[in-house]
C-alpha cells in the first residue's frame, strides 16, 4: 500500500502545481472529465492523458482477514450475502500436507469485458479510464451480465434489483482517494494505479512479467493482476464456499 500511496501523492503534486483550480473543477464534474478526475488514487496521468486503472494483488501478503470485504460493504452499501470483493479460501495439496491459499476476487475491469455486449439496454459501459460501470437508471435487472461474467463478480442487488459490481470505488477515485479495499488492506496486498504510467507501482509490477490473471484463456484481458498466484487457482473462480461470507450483522458489529 505504501507504493500506491507514493503514486497517489506524486499525482496530487502533478495536479495541484499551478492548477489547483482546474483540479477542483475536474472533481466537481467527473462525467465531463473522467480522465482528469480519476488522476488521483495512484495514477500519474499527465495533462491531456487519460489513465488506465488497474490493480495488482500480491497473494503472499493476503492474510484472508476480509477487511477489504467489510470496508467495501460499508463504502458501497453492499446487501447481505452479496459482495463486490471478497477473499475466497481454498485448500491445496502440497506434497503430503494440505495448505490454505487465499484468492482475493473482484471485477476484473476487462479490456474486452464479456458483460458489455450482452446488456440489452446498454446499461454496462467502460469508462475511458478502463473502469467498468453500471448505469442503474438504465439497468432492467435482467441479469444477462451476471451470467456472462466468467469471474463470478456480478450480482443483482437485492435492494435495488439492478446489476451491481466492483467499480474500483470510482466515486473515491474521482475525489482523489484510493479504493476502499486498497485503503483498508492491512497487509498492503492490493496496489492500485495507472497501468499506462511506466513509473506507477502497478506498471512496474506487471512489467516484471510475474503477474498472472484469472482465466487467461478467455482472452478478456483482465486488469486485475496477481502476484504469487498458484497456477491451480487461475481458473478457480466459481464462487465455491469459503470459510467466511459477508453478512450485515457481522460487518456492522
Image (cartoon, rainbow, N blue to C red):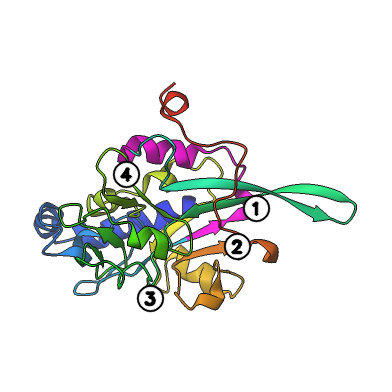
> Are the residues tagged 4 and 2 within 8 Å (C-beta)?
no
Q: Which residues are magenta?
A: 56-77
Q: Which numbered disc flags the more N-terminal residue, 1 or 4?
A: 1
- Which residue is labeled 1 in the image? 60
> Which secondary structure, mark 1?
helix
Mark 2 or 3, closer to the camera: 3
Q: Which numbered disc flags the more N-terminal residue, 2 or 3?
A: 3
Mark 4 or 2, closer to the camera: 4
Q: How many neighbours does mark 3 have within 10 angstroms: few (below 14), some (14-19), or many (20 or more)?
A: some
Q: Which numbered disc flags the more N-terminal residue, 3 or 1?
A: 1
Seen from the viewer's position, the closer of residues 70 and 199 is 70
Residue positioned most to the front: 142
Find the distance from the CA under tag 3 to the CA under tag 1.
Answer: 28 Å
Is residue 62 in the magenta section?
Answer: yes
Q: Which numbered disc flags the more N-terminal residue, 1 or 2?
A: 1
Q: Which numbered disc flags the more N-terminal residue, 4 or 2?
A: 4
Find the distance from the CA under tag 3 to the CA under tag 4.
Answer: 24 Å
Q: Position of residue 130 (x, y in %)?
A: 32, 68
Mark 3 or 1, closer to the camera: 3
Is residue 119 in the magenta section?
Answer: no
Amino acid at each position: 500500500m505504501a507504493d500506491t500511496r507514493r503514486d497517489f501523492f506524486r499525482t496530487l503534486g502533478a495536479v495541484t502545481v499551478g492548477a489547483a483550480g482546474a483540479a477542483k473543477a475536474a472533481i466537481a464534474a467527473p462525467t465531463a472529465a473522467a480522465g482528469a478526475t480519476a488522476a488521483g488514487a495512484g495514477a500519474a496521468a499527465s495533462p491531456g492523458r487519460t489513465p488506465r486503472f488497474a490493480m495488482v494483488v500480491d497473494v503472499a501478503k493476503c492474510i484472508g482477514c476480509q477487511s477489504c470485504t467489510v470496508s467495501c460493504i460499508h463504502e458501497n452499501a453492499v446487501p447481505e450475502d452479496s459482495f463486490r470483493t471478497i477473499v475466497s479460501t481454498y485448500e491445496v495439496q502440497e506434497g503430503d500436507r494440505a495448505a490454505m491459499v487465499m484468492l482475493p476476487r473482484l471485477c476484473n475491469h476487462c479490456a474486452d469485458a464479456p458483460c458489455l455486449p450482452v446488456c440489452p439496454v446498454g446499461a454496462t459501459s467502460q469508462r475511458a479510464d478502463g473502469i467498468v460501470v453500471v448505469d442503474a437508471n438504465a439497468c432492467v435487472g435482467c441479469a444477462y451480465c451476471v451470467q456472462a461474467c466468467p469471474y463470478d463478480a456480478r450480482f443483482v442487488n437485492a435492494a435495488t434489483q439492478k446489476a451491481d459490481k466492483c467499480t474500483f470505488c470510482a466515486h473515491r477515485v474521482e475525489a482523489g482517494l484510493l479504493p476502499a479495499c486498497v485503503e483498508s488492506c492491512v497487509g498492503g496486498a492490493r496496489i492500485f494505479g495507472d497501468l499506462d504510467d511506466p513509473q506507477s507501482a502497478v506498471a512496474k509490477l506487471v512489467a516484471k512479467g510475474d503477474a498472472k490473471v484469472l482465466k487467461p484463456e478467455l482472452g478478456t484481458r483482465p486488469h486485475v493482476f496477481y502476484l504469487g498466484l498458484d497456477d491451480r487457482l487461475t481458473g478457480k473462480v466459481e464462487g465455491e464456499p469459503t470459510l467466511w461470507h459477508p453478512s450485515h450483522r457481522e460487518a456492522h458489529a
